[in-house]
Image: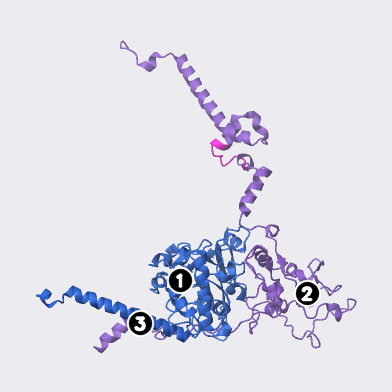
Chain colours: A purple, B blue
């Protein structure tokens, strides 16, 4: 008792209270400053009046499991500008819409349709809708599209106006724009075609070639020979390469294989089942 | 002792050298006269031979020298192949770097591109050279060792197979260019790797350096029937080549620098081949690179090919 008191005992109790209050004030101001920024950015938040308290409850401490969830983890809402920016970042280079596709010209089809206009024979007032084998006309058509599930008037050709195609919603589609009909189901291909990942630019390398490569090349005109890689692109229509009634590419005979230089044996298709080097060695050892 | 005989080693060599020089000059004169006689009025043969012998590297020639070289090449094609060809010298286009993409989901292995390439590029018909090699591979793998490019079947595509055309990738870091000891091959400003056939010494180092088997060697003078010569040629492209030089795909430089698509692109019956300008953000090529799953062949070699494969 008689010895000198320790330093902390010499400070009066009131002094400790002051120090504690100061420390709490500093911490409080720090927390308030820290959470002031996001709450200021989100002007829309209605509870901005009670300042630090709800902010601390929201974000500094993890919400207790028994607390009501929607109040604890209120999702941040993007402003329209932020949403636009995020969408732009998402679509930049990936998954752009058809409206962003570079402009191009589609080769007209009607010039090369031998039987067009259809009203030469068809009468728009009479339509035979029966599904039947075509024995008199159009005998060359093979109905393989969709596994043979389609018939003329249900999905592509118009009953009322046979000179045009028809969309699924009943709108007429010109024969030159048949890609609009195809794209209703084959939307991914249509998108690729618009941007260039599917399909061909116009241009037949050698029209005088005696082996026609595709149906399109049979009907190629002088104008179509000009195929360019530059931006004035002219693309073949879907029906320029695909037969609309049997669209898949048919197997073709490949051109001749490369000749083999003297001294080199052509690769044998069974070369990989021949004995391996180590198996040769084993046989030799046996003989020895 | 030697002086007493009046016949030193030096004097023998000098006199012998003089005699040899005189004989060589006379022989050359005779040869020239003979050649002129053989040419029968076509005085270009001898002068062309001299001109070709002293022709400089393509990049070091003045425009007049290039024009003279082009005239010599055209006369030589007339003599050898009986065809009137037009050798162009179009420079690279500004703001253009060519690139290429092949959709291997769509390639059916019909080899129509190969036919078009051989005819367009005046490749010797008997040489067996083909710039494009269509590999037939088992589906589900990319083991080039097990690929077959000699496939000869009745119909393609074969079940369980897919097809991978390989040609010059026009690498941005071309190992062939670094391998050439005489700088006879280089990359142009538009990204096409070209060969000066008159400067090539035929050492075939580039052929060894290329990991894509894209370079081919002319073992003989290419046989080109006159009716099959493509007259639209380019100095660095499809002009008829002499024997003993290396040649390769140039993205049909004679076509692409005029804005046309390469022959293989237009000949492809399935539209699997896409050609364009890598610097044009609206080109088909750039949209493919942005939206498709693409890969390049042997990418780990860091040759940076400007040639991508993609799938649907």
Viewer-proximal residue among A59 and B148: B148
Q: Which residue is mark 2?
A: A110
Given this view, does label 3 or label 1 mark the residue nearer the observer?
3
Viewer-proximal residue among B183 and A272: B183
- The secondary structure type at the circle numbered 2 is helix
> Crowdedness of circle 1 by 10 Å Cα count: few (<14), some, many (20+)?
some
Q: Main secondary structure of the magenta part?
A: loop
Q: Which residue is mark 3?
A: B27
Q: Position of residue B126 (x, y in %)?
A: 49, 85
Compared to residue A181, the image places residue A26 above or below, namely: above
Q: Which residue is mark 1?
A: B212
Dot placed on the residue nearer the N-terminal end, 3 or 1? 3
Which of the labelled discs sits on residue A280, or is there none?
none
Mark 3, chain letter? B
Residue B92 seen in the current view: yes
Magenta stretch, residue numbers: A59-69
> Crowdedness of circle 3 by 10 Å Cα count: few (<14), some, many (20+)?
few
- The secondary structure type at the circle numbered 3 is helix
Badge 3 and badge 1 both on one subunit: yes
Residue B237 seen in the current view: no
Residue A134: within the magenta? no
Compared to residue B257, the image places residue B136 above or below, namely: below
Give me the C-alpha separation between circle 2 and circle 1: 44 Å
Q: Position of residue A10 (x, y in %)?
A: 39, 13
């Amino acid at each position: 008792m008689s010895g000198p008191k320790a330093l902390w005992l010499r400070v009066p109790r009131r002094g400790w209270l002051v120090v504690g209050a100061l420390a709490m004030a500093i911490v409080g101001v720090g927390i308030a400053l820290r959470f002031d920024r996001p709450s200021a950015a989100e002007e829309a938040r209605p509870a901005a009046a009670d300042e630090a308290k709800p902010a601390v409850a929201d974000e500094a401490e993890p919400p207790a499991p028994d607390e009501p969830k929607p109040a604890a983890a209120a999702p941040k809402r993007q402003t329209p500008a932020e949403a636009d920016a995020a969408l732009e970042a998402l679509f930049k280079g990936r998954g752009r819409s058809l409206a962003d596709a570079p402009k191009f010209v589609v080769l007209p089809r009607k010039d090369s349709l031998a039987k067009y206009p259809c009203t030469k024979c068809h009468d728009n007032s009479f339509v035979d809708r029966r599904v039947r084998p075509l024995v008199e006309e159009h005998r060359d058509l093979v109905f393989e599209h969709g596994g043979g599930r389609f018939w003329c008037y249900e999905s592509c050709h118009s009953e009322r106006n046979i000179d045009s195609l028809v969309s699924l919603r009943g709108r007429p589609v010109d024969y030159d724009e048949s890609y609009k009909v195809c794209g209703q189901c084959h939307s991914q291909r249509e998108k690729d075609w618009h941007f260039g990942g599917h399909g061909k630019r116009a241009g037949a390398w050698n029209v005088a070639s005696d082996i026609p490569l595709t149906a399109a090349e049979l009907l190629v005109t002088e104008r179509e020979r000009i195929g360019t890689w530059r931006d004035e692109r002219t693309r073949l229509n879907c029906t320029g390469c695909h037969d609309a009634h049997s669209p898949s590419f048919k197997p073709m005979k490949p051109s001749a294989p490369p000749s083999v230089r003297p001294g080199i044996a052509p690769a044998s298709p069974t070369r990989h089942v021949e004995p391996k080097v180590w198996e040769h060695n084993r046989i030799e050892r046996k003989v020895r | 002792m030697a002086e007493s005989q009046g016949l030193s080693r030096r004097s023998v060599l000098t006199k012998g050298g003089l005699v040899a020089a005189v004989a060589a000059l006379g022989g050359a004169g005779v040869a020239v006269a003979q050649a002129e006689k053989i040419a029968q009025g076509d005085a270009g043969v001898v002068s062309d031979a001299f001109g070709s012998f002293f022709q400089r590297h393509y990049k070091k020639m003045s425009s007049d020298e290039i024009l003279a070289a082009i005239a010599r090449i055209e006369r030589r094609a007339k003599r050898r192949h009986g065809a009137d060809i037009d050798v162009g010298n179009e420079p690279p286009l500004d703001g253009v770097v060519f690139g290429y993409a092949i959709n291997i989901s769509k390639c059916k292995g019909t080899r129509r591109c190969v036919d078009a390439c051989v005819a367009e590029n005046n490749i010797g018909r008997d040489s067996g050279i083909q710039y494009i090699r269509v590999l037939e591979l088992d589906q589900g793998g990319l083991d080039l060792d097990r690929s077959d490019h000699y496939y000869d079947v009745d119909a393609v595509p074969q079940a369980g197979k897919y097809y991978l055309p390989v040609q010059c990738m026009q690498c941005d870091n071309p190992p062939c260019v670094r391998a050439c000891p005489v700088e006879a091959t280089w990359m142009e400003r538009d990204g096409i790797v070209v060969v000066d056939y008159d400067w090539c010494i035929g050492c075939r180092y580039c052929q060894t350096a290329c990991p894509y088997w894209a370079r081919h060697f002319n073992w003989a003078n290419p046989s080109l029937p006159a009716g099959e010569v493509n007259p639209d040629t380019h100095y660095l492209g499809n002009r008829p080549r002499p024997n003993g030089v290396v040649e390769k795909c140039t993205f049909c430089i004679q076509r692409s620098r005029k804005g046309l698509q390469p022959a293989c692109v237009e000949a492809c019956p399935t539209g699997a081949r896409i050609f364009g300008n890598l610097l044009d953000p609206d080109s088909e090529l750039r949209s493919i690179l942005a939206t498709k799953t693409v890969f390049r062949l042997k990418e780990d070699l860091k040759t940076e090919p400007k040639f991508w494969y993609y799938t649907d």
